[in-house]
């Protein structure tokens, strides 16, 4: 299967110019730009040079639009999780597959955000609907790790080793993603489940940061009020 058919079957439309998140190392996964004299695919169309870009529904909007803000923040989140995952792999943690699944779900979050309901056709909505299953997965993972962790009796600071601290960075980026998605969901332009997923994901990343520290035998730094 060519890159082009892979991308087109995933997004189902040539109007979606590129993979919006981190499916490829440079975040530029579309091969629709390969047409032309050169056989080397080009990742740029230059159509975004004037500060406008396209939604999945084909609308042109300014790049500072809430949609691109949310897409960009979701992308940052996947990148932060990707980095944390690499630290966790280095330490042999058993949960790294969960982080990979979450990165895949974030692709679906991006597709949903990139498809404003007001301009979407039924076919767009069908292809980019966001299901609630990943939320249940997060909840069961959170419950499982929480059972093993000592109860939280103090404020903790992001700490506990590189895996743990990187998961805290991802958690805080997740909360930013949640803030950027909130107005889009509130206006009915994206599925409400997307906001729920991001809300649960920050709890998962917090719990996992603590779990990683515990598994590595690292202590977490406790907040203390400085005199
Ligand atoms: N700065 C941005 N932040 C977040 N999302 C963006 C940004 N720019 C574009 N997008 C979204 O990501 C998709 C892929 O980005 P891409 O860089 O191809 O867009 P472009 O700037 O319009 O095109 P080109 O880079 O070829 O000029 C776009 O179709 C748009 O939905």
Image: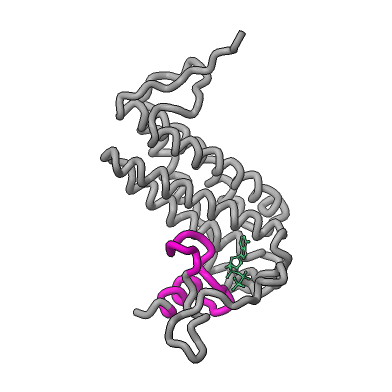
Q: Horizontal and vertical percent for residue 43? A: 51, 74
Magenta segment boundaries in residue numbering: 4-28
How many numbered marks have been drawn onto this rendered protein structure? 0
Magenta span has 22?
yes
Magenta span has 103?
no
Q: Nearer the viewer, residue 73 or 148?
A: 73
- Work out which residue is located at the far left of the displayed protein and give it: 92
| Quadrant, the C terminus | top right
Q: Quadrant of ligand 1?
A: bottom right
Please tell me which residue is depicted at 50% across the width and 38% down the height of the picture. Answer: 169
Q: Is residue 129 left or right of residue 50?
A: left
| Quadrant, the N terminus | bottom left
- Work out which residue is located at the far top of the displayed protein and give it: 227
Magenta span: predominant SS is loop
Please tell me which residue is depicted at 44% across the width and 53% down the height of the picture. Answer: 103
Please tell me which residue is depicted at 46% across the width and 88% down the height of the picture. Answer: 38
Q: Horizontal and vertical percent for residue 198? A: 54, 45
User: Image quadrant of residue 165?
Assistant: top left
Q: Horizontal and vertical percent for residue 215? A: 30, 29
Q: Horizontal and vertical percent for residue 63? A: 69, 63
């Amino acid at each position: 299967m060519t890159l082009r058919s892979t991308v087109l079957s995933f997004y189902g439309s040539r109007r979606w110019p590129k993979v919006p998140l981190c499916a490829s190392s440079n975040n530029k996964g579309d091969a629709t730009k390969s047409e032309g004299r050169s056989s080397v695919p080009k990742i740029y169309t230059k159509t975004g040079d004037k500060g406008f870009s396209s939604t999945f529904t084909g609308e042109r909007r300014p790049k500072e639009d809430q949609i691109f803000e949310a897409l960009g923040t979701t992308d940052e989140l996947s990148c932060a999780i990707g980095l944390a995952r690499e630290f966790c792999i280095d330490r042999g943690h058993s949960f790294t597959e969960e982080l990979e699944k979450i990165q895949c779900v974030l692709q679906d979050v991006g597709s949903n955000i990139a498809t404003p309901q007001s301009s979407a056709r039924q076919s767009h909505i069908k292809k980019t609907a966001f299901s609630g299953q990943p939320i249940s997965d997060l909840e069961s993972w959170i419950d499982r790790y929480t059972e093993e962790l000592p109860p939280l009796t103090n404020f903790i600071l992001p700490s506990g080793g590189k895996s743990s601290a990187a998961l805290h960075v991802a958690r805080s980026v997740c909360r930013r993603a949640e803030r950027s998605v909130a107005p889009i969901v509130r206006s009915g332009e994206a599925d409400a489940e997307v906001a729920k997923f991001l809300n649960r994901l920050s709890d998962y990343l917090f719990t996992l940061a603590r779990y990683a520290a515990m598994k590595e035998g690292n202590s977490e730094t406790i907040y203390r009020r400085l005199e």
